[in-house]
Image (cartoon, helix red, strand yellow):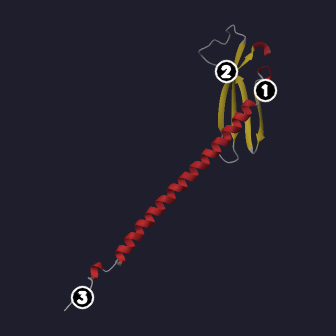
Amino acid sequence: MSRTTAPERSTAGFTLIEALVALSIVAVSLSSIGALIATTVRGSRTIDRNVVQLETARAIATALPDRGQLALGSFSGEIAGHRWRVDVSPWVTTDVGPRQNTPWAPQLVVVTVQAPAGAPMQISTVRLQRRGGG
């Protein structure tokens, strides 16, 4: 005579608690992945915006007039929705005397670019101009 044994109740399948624990682990994992993706997208947009501002500032800096034509003062404009401003002033430092006998006068050139939405970005450089305007 063969006896068939019925499977025990504890090994027959998942209980409701086990299913809920598994679902909660999946939910926590998916929400963590979603938060990571959102942070990555936000960072990528910030980098893109900064690169566009930097490239706009570089384009303005390379389009500046020649040494002899770049006058002290400020001028501004707009390119592709980005407002920009160029400030040219004498470069002042305590390391070099202002009345040294050189044919060159250093000028500080600051280019500021303001995106339609976002913080302004500045790049600065020093240009040499012949004393006496020539």
Give the mark count: 3
Look at the numbered disc 2 and give the secondary structure of its residue.
loop
Question: Which residue has dot 1 on it?
Answer: 65
In primary-sequence order, the first of circles 3 and 1 is 3
Question: Which residue has dot 2 on it?
Answer: 91
Q: CA distance from mark 2 to mark 3?
A: 98 Å
In the image, taking residue 56 as reference, residue 3 lies left or right, namely: left
Q: Residue 130 at what x, y percent from top left? A: 75, 15
Q: Is residue 119 visible?
A: no
In primary-sequence order, the first of circles 2 and 1 is 1
Indicate which disc residue 4 carries. Answer: 3
**Label 2 crowd bin: few (<14), some (14–19), many (20+), radius 10 Å:** some
The amino acid type, in three-letter code, at marker 3 is Thr
Q: Which part of the image, by quadrant, shows the N terminus?
A: bottom left
Closer to us: 88 or 124:
124
Using the rendered view, name the quadrant where residue 10 is placed: bottom left
Q: CA distance from mark 2 to mark 1?
A: 18 Å
| Nearer mark to the viewer, of 2 and 3 | 3
Q: Residue 14 at what x, y percent from top left? A: 35, 77
In the image, taking residue 35 as reference, residue 7 lies left or right, namely: left
Q: Residue 42 at what x, y percent from top left? A: 58, 51
| Nearer mark to the viewer, of 2 and 1 | 1
| Relative vertical location of residue 25 with respect to residue 47 in this rendering, above or below | below
The amino acid type, in three-letter code, at marker 1 is Pro
